Image: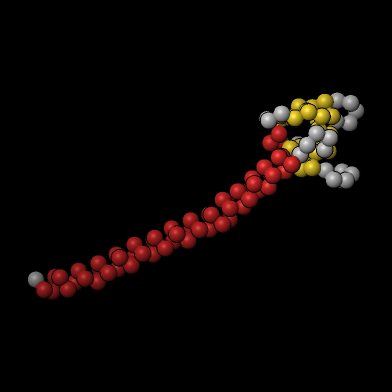
Amino acid sequence: MLTILAEDAPEAAASGNLLFTIVLYAVVIGGLFYFLLIRPQRTRAKRHEELVSAIDIGDEVQTIGGIFGTIEFMDEETAVLQIEGGGRLRVARRALANKVTGEPS
């Protein structure tokens, strides 16, 4: 009976070591996901939110589709752009990509 118990002890230690290894890999992969995917996305979303809140009527902007225009009217969810040629375009505020400071390239 003592020989049976003595033989089971190394297997128990090996399974505990295996569990530790699996948990360690899960923590490392979770950390990689956070630092490579989640954190940069939050940073981009925060910068975009700051950009949208800083834009005002009369600013020249570019949409995510590449359309340039000057903001003529804004409400909480949409903006009306005056585009070249006299046309007007209504877009969602979240579709504004950046504020144009100089001539478009």
Residue 79 in percent (x, y) is at 75, 30
Say which residue appears at 90% left-offset and 28% top-offset: 85
Q: Quadrant of the N terminus?
A: bottom left
Say which residue appears at 84% left-offset and 35% top-offset: 58
Furthest-left residue in this view: 1
Q: Is residue 69 visible?
A: no
Question: Closest to the observer: 71 or 87?
Answer: 71
Please tell me whether residue 27 is drawn above or below residue 50 in the rendered image: below
Question: Closest to the observer: 6 or 48?
Answer: 48
Q: Is residue 47 left or right of 15 when viewed as pictured? A: right
Please tell me whether residue 43 is drawn above or below residue 67 in the rendered image: below
Residue 31 in percent (x, y) is at 50, 58
Q: Quadrant of residue 15?
A: bottom left
Say which residue appears at 71% left-offset and 28% top-offset: 75
Figure colour scheme: secondary structure
Number of disc labels: 0
Say which residue appears at 76% left-offset and 27% top-offset: 90
Residue 91 in percent (x, y) is at 74, 30
Q: Quadrant of residue 103?
A: top right
Question: Closest to the observer: 49 or 25?
Answer: 49
Please tell me whether residue 89 is drawn above or below residue 48 in the rendered image: above
Q: Is residue 82 visible?
A: yes
Residue 38 in percent (x, y) is at 56, 50
Q: Quadrant of residue 2?
A: bottom left
Please tell me whether residue 24 is drawn above or below residue 49 in the rendered image: below
